[in-house]
Image: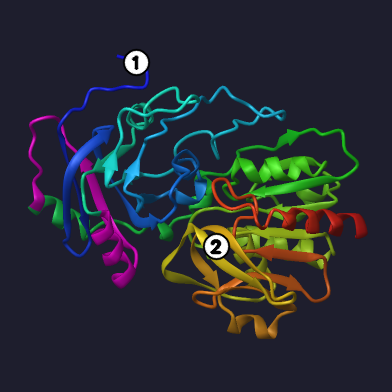
Amino acid sequence: MSKNESIKTEKKAVLVLEDGSCFIGTGFGAKGKIHGEIVFNTGMVGYPEALTDPSYHGQILVLTYPLIGNYGVPSWNVLDRWKIPKFFESENIKVNGFVVHEYCDRPHHWQSTQTLGNWLESENIPGLQGIDTRLLTKKLRVHGVMLGVLEVFEEGVEPNLDSLIKEATRVPDPNDLDLVAEVTCKEPIFYDNEARKRVVVIDCGVKHNVLRELLACGVDVVRVPYNFFADEIMEYKPSGVLITNGPGDPKKVPDTIATVNNLIEDNVPVMGICFGNQIVSLACGGDTYKLKYGHRSHNQPCVDLFTGRCYITNQNHGYAVNLDSLKDTDLELWFQNVNDKTVEGVRHKKRNVLSVQFHPEHAAGPVDTKYIFDLFLNMLESA
């Protein structure tokens, strides 16, 4: 048997939603029980990137594409020229649990070094397969994201559904916590390009490809914890500051909001991505709210209101900026979602500030909006 193959074992597994719905299937990955917020992503590829995306921290991820695991898991030892793992968005798996329709335990890809199931097991993440993920997704679209419990049992053990249904009604909402504190770096990390310009990245749960795209622009990068104050950031003499993606409710990080407000008032060039877009908006006096089921896909159409051009974007967020709240701020609407008209980007009328709700660094997803990094670089040059 090759290194990319594993023996199928029939471990019962069940996902129970807070409304009492039960989805019974087969377990893969680790045995055990976890809870979290259940969300879905409609991307067809990119499960190594999705599983390691810190924005999914506290969540049980459901993938709607029916076959997952078919190209295995690449090596962590493949690094880019800045010594960042090439195929993963953080240092480990960030989801609480994983749900798919059909798990492929015999992958075929020249870069695969292990099966998806083996990887999940090595990081103690339970997985569920063999359920109707289409039905589950439709339920989440109608009701909205729900809390739930996922458990993978030992072979031969039957689930106690009554007990799990009761437990699912008492699952704590991860969005009530400061999830960013659990995924941010603990101390500054330096990425040296021997460049003239330096960008400080406020790490709210940064994806590796955000760092990679910044470094490809030819700047030095200093990655700092999310709770650094403005004066601490300014000690690094940044040409600009980028606020990253991250998990949970942006209002749970008031220190970050205050820091960004101070930076903007000092006319430091600022860029926000995803969670960072919400932080920029809150720092300028705007407001945010929770979406019914979020945007998590590779095919979200967003239109630039200044050029009229539409881009297909990669997204992963459960909160959004309130459009009406921008009226009394110095922010103007830049990008808007074509499907539901939600805010997808803002620009400051007086300061060097821009932010987008989508992911211009893609990974995985369309590369249409990589040029946003060039706009940020141009802003640094002209500031």
Residue 95 or residue 223, whichever sits in front:
95
Task: Say if residue 226 shows up in the picture.
Answer: yes
Image quarter where the N terminus lies is top left
Is the residue marked by circle 1 packed among few (<14), some (14-19), or many (20+) residues within 10 Å? few
Badge number at residue 250: 2
Q: Amino acid at mark 2?
A: Pro
Q: Disc 1 to disc 2, how far (Cα)?
A: 45 Å
**Residue 11 coordinates in the image, percent (x, y):** 16, 34
Q: Which residues are magenta?
A: 133-161
Disc 1 marks a residue whose amino acid type is: Ser
Check disc 1 and report its element: helix, strand or loop.
loop
Instruction: Tell me if residue 154 is in the magenta stretch.
Output: yes
Q: Is residue 332 above or below residue 253?
A: below
Q: Nearer the viewer, mark 1 or mark 2?
A: 1
First-in-chain label (1 vs 2): 1
Residue 170: quadrant of the picture: bottom left
Asked if residue 55 lies left or right of residue 149, the reply is right
Residue under the image location 22 percent in, 54 percent down: 132
Left or right: residue 81 compared with residue 13: right
Q: In the figure, 345 relative to 200: above or below?
A: below
Compared to residue 315, the image places residue 222 above or below, namely above
Nearer to me, 159 or 106: 106
Residue at numbered disc 1: 2
Counting from the top left corner in percent of width and height, residue 361 is at 64, 50
- Image point 28% across, 22% down: which residue? 6
355 with respect to 337 (left or right): right
Q: Which mark is residue 24?
A: none
In reply to whether residue 142 is colored magenta, the answer given is yes
| Residue 215 drawn at (x, y percent) | 76, 40
Residue placed most toward the observer, 167 or 383: 383
